[in-house]
Amino acid sequence: MSTLSLPPFLASPRQDAIDLYKAFKGFGCDSAAVVNILAHRDATQRALIQQEYKTMYSEELTSRLSSELGGTLKA
């Protein structure tokens, strides 16, 4: 069984949403940044990130993830 390791500080959902948006910008996607953010957050934190992302950018985070990621990372 794997263990979830949280970062020493808790990033705000707003900052995580901004960082995800930046990872999606440009040609291609910074999949390492996306995984680094989402893999180190629990379900409650990811839900808050989704809400913040939709508020800030008027689009669903899950839709953006699906369009940006491919292969084994696809949502």
Image (tube, rainbow, N blue to C red):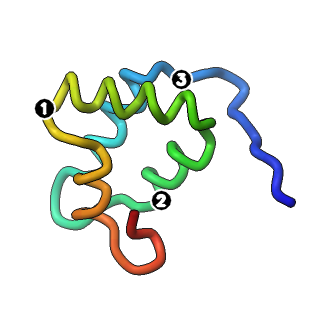
**Disc number for residue 11:** 3
Residue occupying image coordinates x 22% and y 64%: 67
Cα–Cα gap, marks 2 and 3: 17 Å
Place of residue 20 in the rendered image (x, y in percent of width and height, measured from the top left) = 34, 42
Horizontal and vertical percent position of residue 32: 47, 59
- Earlier residue among tags 2 and 3: 3
| Residues at discs 2 and 3 in contact (Cβ within 8 Å) | no
Task: Give the residue type that dot 1 points to.
Answer: Ser
**SS of the residue at dot 2?**
helix
Against 61, residue 54 (above or below) is above
| Relative image position of residue 70 (x, y in whole percent) | 34, 74
* Disc on res. 72: none
Mark 2 highlights which residue?
A: 32
Disc 3 element: loop
- Tell me the element at label 1: loop
Marks 3 and 1, Cα distance to the nearest angstrom? 21 Å
For label 1, the residue is: 58
26 to 73, vertically: above or below: above
